[in-house]
Structures are given as structure tokens and as C-alpha cells.
Image (cartoon, rainbow, N blue to C red):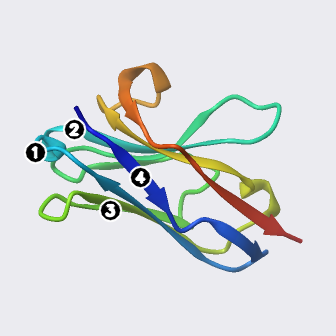
Amino acid sequence: QVQLVESGGGLVQAGGSLRLSCAASGRTFSTYAMGWFRQAPGKERECVARINWSSATYYANSVKGRFTISRDNAKNTVNLQMNSLKPEDTAVYYCAAGRYSNNASAYNYWGQGTQVTVSS
């Protein structure tokens, strides 16, 4: 079992930055791929970034060059540094643990979500 708790969301102006953090419980954290997903009202949940056990990463085209995912297996944390934020980045952001995939169904464990709002 893995429990995930996100933090770091909030309101920021366009062009600003936020850092999301996800703290995981459980001794098997390092064996899971971790993903950051987001869901805006009326839209499907999408994977914006993911990182596997060896820190290989993937980014959605919409965030490439602006977002950076990282993990610290010793601290059971995964972070998402978000720079040059745009209004279209506004969504609820979720941390997830599971298999290395863009598909939400590949992830067994989810956090409660944290709201990110980018004003224009």
C-alpha cells in the first residue's frame, strides 16, 4: 500500500512558478513509477510528467521545457517544478504511483489532488 499526499498548489500569475510536492508512505516507494496528472473542468485527466525508478522521465508536449519532475527515493518524495506557467495550466494536479505509463489506469495509487490556478 502507498499513500500519497500532495502540497504546493495555489494561485499564481501567468509567467510565475510553483513547486508541487508529493509525499509517499510505504517501504516500496522506490519500485513504483510516479506520475503527475492534471484535470481541468470538462476535460479528461492527462499525464503531464512521469518518472520511473531509475529517474527516466517523460513530459507532455504542452509542458516540455517548463516543467521538471524529480524524485528522492530516500525521502519518498516526488516533485514537479512548474515554471513559465500559463492560464491553460490551470487544473487540479494529482500525484500517482504505479506503472510507467501515460494511461491513468496504470496507476494504482492516487493523491487527493491540489488546485493550481494561473491568472492572466
Q: Which mark is residue 32?
A: 2
Q: Give percent across and percent down for residue 39.
A: 67, 39
The mark nearer the N terminus, 3 or 1, is 1
Q: Which mark is residue 70?
A: 3
Q: Which mark is residue 27?
A: 1
Q: Amino acid at mark 4?
A: Val
Q: Which mark is residue 5?
A: 4
Q: Nearer the viewer, residue 70 or 24?
A: 24
User: Considering only vertical position in the picture, is 102 above or below 11?
Assistant: above
Q: Judging from the image, what secondary structure is the residue with disc 1 in? A: loop
Q: CA distance from mark 4 to mark 1?
A: 15 Å
Q: CA distance from mark 3 to mark 4?
A: 16 Å
Q: Amino acid at mark 1?
A: Arg
* Foreground tag (3 vs 1): 1
* Foreground tag (2 vs 3): 2
Q: CA distance from mark 2 to mark 3?
A: 13 Å
User: Considering only vertical position in the picture, is 104 above or below 91?
Assistant: above
Q: Residue at x 28, y 60 (%)?
A: 77
Q: Judging from the image, what secondary structure is the residue with disc 3 in? A: strand
Q: CA distance from mark 3 to mark 1?
A: 19 Å
Cβ–Cβ below 8 Å for labels 4 and 1? no
Q: Residue at x 75, y 55 (%)?
A: 90
The mark nearer the N terminus, 1 or 2, is 1
Q: Residue at x 32, y 42 (%)?
A: 3
Label 1 neighbour load within 10 Å: few <14, some 14-19, many 20+? few
Q: Amino acid at mark 3?
A: Ser
Q: Give percent across and percent down for residue 24.
A: 28, 51
